[in-house]
Image: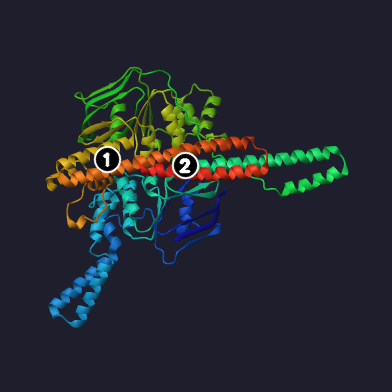
Amino acid sequence: MILTVSNLSKGFNKEILKNVSFSVAEKEKAALIGINGAGKSTVLKILTGELSQDLGEITLKQNTKLGYLKQTHTELENTILEELTSVFSGLINIEKEIEQITFEISEKGGKEELIIKLDKLNEKYERQGGFLYKSQINGVIKGLGLDANSKIGNLSGGQRRVVSMARLLLSKNDLLLLDEPTNHLDLDTIMWLEDYLKNYDGAVLIVSHDRYFMNRLVTKIIEIEHGETEIYNGNYDTYLKEKLARQEIKKHHYETNRNQIKKMEDSIALLKSFGREKQVKRARSKEKALDRMEKLEDVKEVKTAKINFHINKTTGNDVLTVRNLTTYIGDTIIAKNINFDIKRGERVALIGPVGIGKTTLFNNLLEKDWNDSDEVIFGTNVQIETYDQHHDKKLNPQNTIFEEVHNAYPHLLNLDIRNALASFLFIGDDVFKEIGSLSGGEKARVLLTIMSLSGANVLMLDEPTNHLDINTKTILEEALKNYEGTVFYISHDRYFINETATKVLNLTENGTKEYLGNYDYYLEKVYEAELYFSSQFSNSENDNFEFLQNKNISKQKNSEENKSDNTSFLQSKLKAAKVGSGKEEYEQKKKQEAEKRSIKNKLKSIESKIENLEQNLTDLETQLQNEQDHTKLASIFSEKEMKEAELIELYEQWEILNN
């Protein structure tokens, strides 16, 4: 193991961590998850020495180089290229030394000791990656969508954080600690980062609320709940299934234990009721046995918000029609030829790279800021409620939570406001906290409270899952799926888009393209389109490269220098899927069809086993409910546990074959 954490405890005003234990193996990719305030970032700060633990031990493998994503830039006049090049200062010093010795040899002649020293330096330079580092810098700059010539001092906080991550990725650490690494990244950049970290030679421990990211990257989930840790092997979806199975088992253990205690208590009470010395002695003996008996706790439930959006009236079928819209920042055109339709009941996700003007488009629509040549038509009875990712634009930091909701809905009774806030976990004196003192997640819940009371039939949401923990995201997803109105939202949260979107609208500088499905459907259609066009251009590698440039799938030069650079997810899929011609194409097609048949047969076999196992589990559950004999109960429950473990494994095999 490269990292082992044992029985870690930490408290501030109250105990945050009380029994945190986990390990990370070399080259393992693991995620640390939990609700907001569970202590995830506290764990990372303890690991880096920024905070000290109250109790517990942390063991790092000897000579482990630890990298932690934090934002520190002292040289604000540096360009991004200069900042990232400074990571390789050791190699640059070797370069200078090689240059100096080479100059001395050319001036003074080839002295043997200089030639030997030069050979050793060249060997050291190559061993430490001297011939690759410039290409690595270039690949990370392009992959993260950075402008090499931009000065650090001119960057936003989010951009500086991305530069910090670029430094970290280039620093060749044995263990990376990343706190919300996908924040401030667009979809293409997140996919690039996933591929980069998958192939990263060291171990990675991330704190993340990005479920799609975890599904593609991690092989272990470490959940902090009620101050303690639970370990799950697999990705996020596997964790969800496994957690549910474990909770059911714990619940059953608790029920069985409670029934045993109840029987013992009834028996003791009955013996005492006889009032005879012999029975009283037996009762006392049983009381001692009862005291020794293990008392299991019921499954602890995590408090979650209750989100419900309702509408006051129904819109017409046509909610929003946009034709030939152009968006600007100042006098600069950001995007043009924007055309789309939104119908009643649709949930439309607006995606696109950072800086393409998604929020600008929202603002143009809401403020009716468009030219006479643009056609924007809102349908009948449309009543819009908005959610702004920059919470302070809609919230007054001097107001209390209660005042903020009351100001939005002055006609509501105080009791109604308190009930609404309680649904979003603002209970008791919490409602009198000032907005300015709240965390990002708490401000998000205040905005959601206001939205839930609006009765609007159209919701326009800008990055609604920012600052929300996974539990709240899940509840929001269900609320939007049950909402009878229409939803138009901006998001980089692919899992959220998959769960909620009925249509994906991709915004580029040259217009919009609609995909009638969720994010995975969008990705599939983009991949199919790129594959088709790639085959059309296969006779000319240069033409194909130019096409990929125009489609913004690849931004790398087609040279030997950059062949080692990490590429985007779509580009790598595209290269892997290039189809040959003639006989090669025929053989490839035959092989693919054979593989499909094999997978189909395996899936059919697994599905049959799953069906049989599920029926077996139903039968065992019935037996558990009806059986009274303790010994038989234990045997049935043991068999049920084995069947459940087997079922989870089959589900995992089924998912792998379906991907």
- Name the quadrant of the N terminus: bottom left
Image side of residue 451 versus residue 295, left or right: left
**Disc sitting over residue 240 in the figure:** 2
Q: Neighbour class for label 2 at 10 Å: few (<14), some, many (≥20)?
A: few
The disc, 1 or 2, on the residue closer to the chain's N-terminal end is: 2
Q: Residue furthest bottom?
A: 112
Query: Residue 166 at x, y = what percent?
Result: 31, 54
Residue type beneath disc 1: Gly
Query: Residue 201 at x, y = what percent?
Result: 35, 58
Q: Nearer the viewer, residue 172 or 542?
A: 542
**Disc sitting over residue 385 in the figure:** none
Residue type beneath disc 2: Leu
**Disc sitting over residue 355 in the figure:** 1
Query: Which residue is at a point 14% across and 48% down the rendered structure image?
Result: 541
Question: Is 304 situated above or below 320?
Answer: below
How many numbered badges does the structure rendering display?
Answer: 2
Callout 1: helix, strand or loop?
A: loop
